[in-house]
Image (cartoon, rainbow, N blue to C red):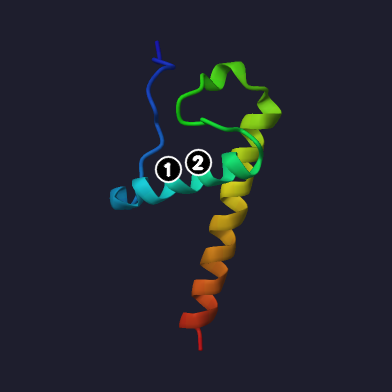
Amino acid sequence: MQNNNTNSNKLVVPEAKAALDQMKLEIANELGLQNYESIDKGNLTARQNGYVGGYMTKNLVKMAQQNMGRTGK
């Protein structure tokens, strides 16, 4: 039986964890979710949690595209 409490997401660059955590907190604050690091995410709606992850993905894609544009010249 699979343990649902383990995080199966493996970071390709473990050193990026702090930056990703910081980005998550900044986005949560922008969305009006204060104290995001200490609140029980299970008490948030799927929409609230989805917004944080969605905006993180949007920002990471934007950063990658900008980086690709700089290195492709």
Name the secondary structure under disc 1. Answer: helix
Tell me which residue sits at (40%, 15%) in the image.
2
Quadrant containing the N terminus in the rendered view = top left
Residue type at tag 1: Asp
Label 2 sits on residue: 25
Disc 1 residue crowd, few under 14, some 14–19, many 20+, Cα 10 Å: few
Tell me which residue sits at (39%, 31%) in the image.
8
Horizontal side, residue 51 vs residue 1: left or right: right
Residue type at tag 2: Leu
The percent coordinates of residue 50 (x first, y second) are: 64, 34
The percent coordinates of residue 61 (x first, y second) are: 57, 59
The percent coordinates of residue 40 (x first, y second) are: 51, 19
Q: Examine the rendered structure and indicate whether residue 42 appears above or below residue 51.
A: above
Disc 2 residue crowd, few under 14, some 14–19, many 20+, Cα 10 Å: some
Horizontal side, residue 51 vs residue 37: left or right: right
Residue extending farthest left:
15
Q: Are marks 1 and 2 in contact (CB under 8 Å)?
A: yes
Nearer-the-camera pick, 1 or 72:
72
The percent coordinates of residue 3 (x first, y second) are: 39, 15
Tell me which residue sits at (53%, 57%) in the image.
60
Horizontal side, residue 42 vs residue 6: left or right: right
Tell me which residue sits at (44%, 46%) in the image.
22
Which quadrant of the structure image shows residue 30?
Answer: top right
Q: CA separation, marks 1 and 2?
A: 6 Å
Label 1 sits on residue: 21
Residue 51: give its label. none
Q: Examine the rendered structure and indicate whether residue 41 appears above or below residue 13.
A: above
